[in-house]
Image (cartoon, rainbow, N blue to C red):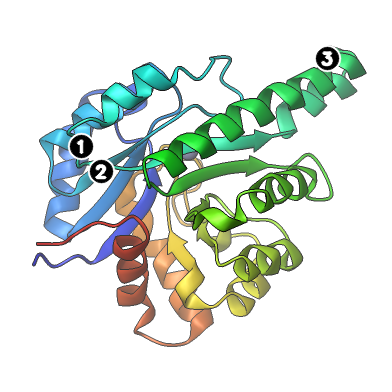
Amino acid sequence: MQEINYFDIHSHLHSDFFQKDTETIIKEMKKKKIWTISVGVNFNDSKKAIALSQKHTNIFATIGIHPTEKETFDEKKFQKLLDNNEKIVGIGECGLDYHWPTIDYNKNKITKEVLEEEKKRQKKLFTQQIDFAIKNSLPLMLHVRPYKNSDAYTDALKILDDYKDNNLKVNFHFFTDTPDIAQKIIKRNFSLSLPGVITFADLDLNIKKTPTKNIMSETDSPFASPKPYRGKTNTPLHISKIVEKITDIKKHQEVKNLLVKNALNFWNIKNH
Ligand SMILES: [Zn+2]
């Protein structure tokens, strides 16, 4: 049994963004007992995430296609990645992203028909990955980004409701939406992971109203650094700031350990 201080359940540590710093960051993570899941956003990127996870005991991987990636889901190719690979703990990040296509539509860059086609394309890509997760009994790492009024969340939950008899484990990554949506997620016994945004935007009510058992901690490195690192490259080393904020609001010291436990439990990671 290894001691784990923090679990950053969503980073892109394998990304080229970190270049030669990756190994230095990982060395420091090991010293501080920080574990992470490096998340794939397309097929080749997923392979890079796996490669990094195989080199380090404190790193795991997910494989999948992000909703804004223009790639079709080739089940056979992804299935091959899964064979004999215990470091892959989930499918994703996948889901719905209405933010970017709607901005294009509002700038008259694309027509209403193209926007609707894009939403349809994303929904298909999403359901293919839900089916794949069920087939392989793996949890889902979701990326859901609304344009307004939680639009993408409403659609994602509607899609997931069609699968409610499948015992699906679902995590909504980078959760910064309304307490109302948070409640809908909890009611379905799904979980949400909180990013660095909680250290500078007022999302306290979300944290207060969400039971600790439904919360996990994440950095989404290299993006979205918490206070006091805003504007700088984010790394899993910053996870402590996010956990401190959750602990402050929940007002009990056990939160730090519970967040680690939640992560191990949710992603079926055995710590031995
Ligand atoms: Zn991500």
Q: Secondary structure beneath disc 1?
A: helix
- Residue drawn at point x = 45 percent, y = 17 percent: 74
The residue tagged 3 is: 114
- Residue drawn at point x = 34 percent, y = 61 percent: 263
> What residue type is disc 1 on?
Ser
Look at the picture and state if 162 lies above or below 63.
below
**Picture quadrant of residue 89:** top left
Disc on res. 91: none
**Image quadrant occupied by the N terminus:** bottom left
Look at the picture and state if 44 lies above or below 246.
above
The residue tagged 1 is: 53
x and y, in percent, of residue 69 in the image: 56, 20
Separation of disc 3 and disc 1 at Cα? 38 Å
- Residue drawn at point x = 65 percent, y = 27 percent: 124
**Picture quadrant of residue 67:** top right
Look at the picture and state if 247 lies above or below 167.
below
Q: On the picture, is 199 further left or further right than 105?
A: left
Dot 2 surroundings within 10 Å: few (below 14), some, or many (20 or more)?
A: many
The residue tagged 2 is: 60
Badge 2 residue CB within 8 Å of ligand 1? no
Badge 1 residue CB within 8 Å of ligand 1? no
Tags 1 and 2 touching, CB below 8 Å? yes
Q: On the picture, is 79 further left or further right than 113?
A: left
**Image quadrant occupied by the C terminus:** bottom left
x and y, in percent, of residue 152 in the image: 74, 42
Dot 3 surroundings within 10 Å: few (below 14), some, or many (20 or more)?
A: few
**Who comes first in sequence, dot 2 or dot 3?**
2
